[in-house]
Amino acid sequence: MQRIGDAPRTRRLLIGLAVALSVLFLLLPLIAIFAQAFAEGVAIFWNNLSDEYTLAAIGLTLLVTALTIPVNLVFGVFLAWLVTRFEFPGRRLLQTLIDIPFAVSPVVAGLVYLLLYGSSGWVGSWLDGYDIQLMFAWPGIVLVTIFVTCPFVARELIPLMQAQGAGEEEAAVTLGASGWTIFRRVTLPNIKWALLYGVILTNARAVGEFGAVSVVSGSIRGETNTLPLHVELLYQDYNTVGAFTAAALLALIALFTLAAKAGLEWRATRREQFR
Amino acid sequence: MIATFTGTAQKRVLPGFGLSLGITLLFVSLVLLLPMTSLVGQLAGLSLAEYWAIITEERVVASYMITIGAAAVAAIVNAFFGLLMAWVLVRYEFPGRRLLDALMDLPFALPTAVAGITLATMYSSSGFMGKLLAPLGIEISYTWVGIALAMAFTSIPFVVRTVQPVLEDLPQEIDEAALTLGASDTLAFRRVILPHLWPALVTGTGLAFVRSLGEFGAVIFIAGNMPFETEITSLMIFVKLQEYDYVGASAIASVVLAVSLLLLLALNLWQGRFIRRLHGGKG
């Protein structure tokens, strides 16, 4: 079988070029993060990590992520169920709408939330009357993070559920299963890996969101400073090693995300081979 | 509206239509649509002349130029790099291929601020790459090139991941037919393979461009943020907000928002037309 570009010279040239460019533009920056974080030794790295404000930033980031994931998980599953299992007017529009967060610049996302929920916005001023402040406080960070990450779970589920079709669920209905039972016993086992990957992507983005969060956070050290904002703060304080220590933590989460994706893909191709 | 919903719902076999529709609509309205309306509300108080004055202010126009120029360079670089990577990952087997494949998603997984400080440090005059390039007279950090570099980094996966599946689905017979008819590799690639990849390549490049237009976290660290020179539009919005000029920020944001939504719409329409043409009216 003849294939285009299979001559040994072309092959070597293209692979070499691809590897060289990837190393230069992707691998080197990744290595640089850890090199900088450990530039002054492991002890300093550890010291930076256990800094009071870094710990507070880690805590806030965990809180925001822990609140964002369940909300978007529930929404994503309901949305995917709705658009893949039913026909109704406006279905296409709905699928387009949930992609809005991907099209909107993070700073603009932060801005629209600030306008609505800030003390001069109409929801914000109403809440002000009850002494509830959402912006420049952690609830605002949670809100924009939910906005920015809401498409991920649905995006993973919709193509899969569309491909699987509703046959198995319909069979379950005729056997008399209730809605919750169908979901738990029929749908969930079929979608669990896609769901997991959707959650991992939501997690990665929620932990790392910068633009939208920096608009609504106010960056108060120890209070409304998430880990990415803390990276910026340290960097601008000329504490490079400190900044890269926090960055290394975030990079670890990114590496975990990549590993999870590779693992799930490997699993999927293996299952295909056994069929 | 409601009548048709319940009317068709009665014929549905699967449960949960009402509940899913209710939760989805509530979420979409509260999380996505309501905040968007606040932008319109903020701008409603402006006269057209005032709006025009804000969005055509000299410093703002300069930021459009810088953003669009750098995003265009980033997108074009990614078109070539993405095509190369997709080709190598799909067509060749070699040790480390899976690792390279996984590495392609790094820019999406890595927080933008982390990418920003890393690139800024690497390419600054005291950084590892900066030191290598300085003797050649190439400065990247705090210049326009740095902005394009950061934008290119964050949008790497778009072209690779849109072209890759199309290339995987191309049947081998295409190659053979072209080559047995005596075409050279380059000619066969250009005339036989590339036409099939074209829609995916344009879509991926377009998505990379849109993403680059809105990029903030990765760019601000390496840009230096000098007015008229290395200030991007997202930063303009941010600066206005810090001056509590919510109206000004909203006006500029509306331009950014309109441009990205229009571009995405155009991409969708173009893709739809292309697919219809390929499948002879269907699809």
Image: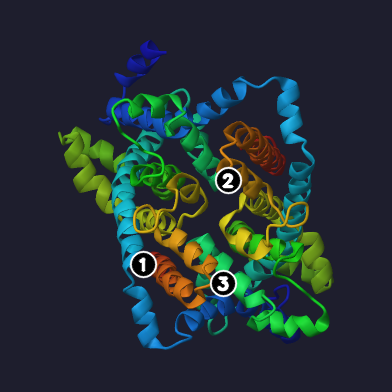
Q: Who comes first in sequence, dot 2 or dot 1?
A: 1
Under tag 1, what secondary structure? helix
Quarter that holds the C terminus of chain A: bottom left
Mark 3 residue type:
Thr
Q: Are marks 2 and 1 on the same chain?
A: yes
Q: Nearer the viewer, mark 2 or mark 3?
A: 3
In front of the other: B124 or A70: B124
What residue did someone put label 2 on? A105
Q: Nearer the viewer, mark 3 or mark 1?
A: 1
Quarter that holds the N terminus of chain A: bottom right
The quadrant in which residue B248 appears is top right
What residue did someone put label 1 on? A54
Mark 1 residue type:
Thr
Q: What percent of the width, then of the height, locates residue A272?
A: 40, 64
Residue B174 against residue A189 in the figure, above or below: below
Under tag 2, what secondary structure? loop
Mark 3 chain: B
Residue B3 against residue A105 in the figure, above or below: above
- The answer for how far apart the CA atoms under marks 2 and 1 are is 27 Å
Q: What percent of the width, then of the height, locates residue B97?
A: 54, 78
- The answer for how far apart the CA atoms under marks 3 and 1 are is 19 Å
What residue did someone put label 3 on? B118
The circle on residue B71 is none
Q: How many marks?
A: 3
Mark 2 chain: A
In this view of the protein, can residue B104 be seen by the observer? no
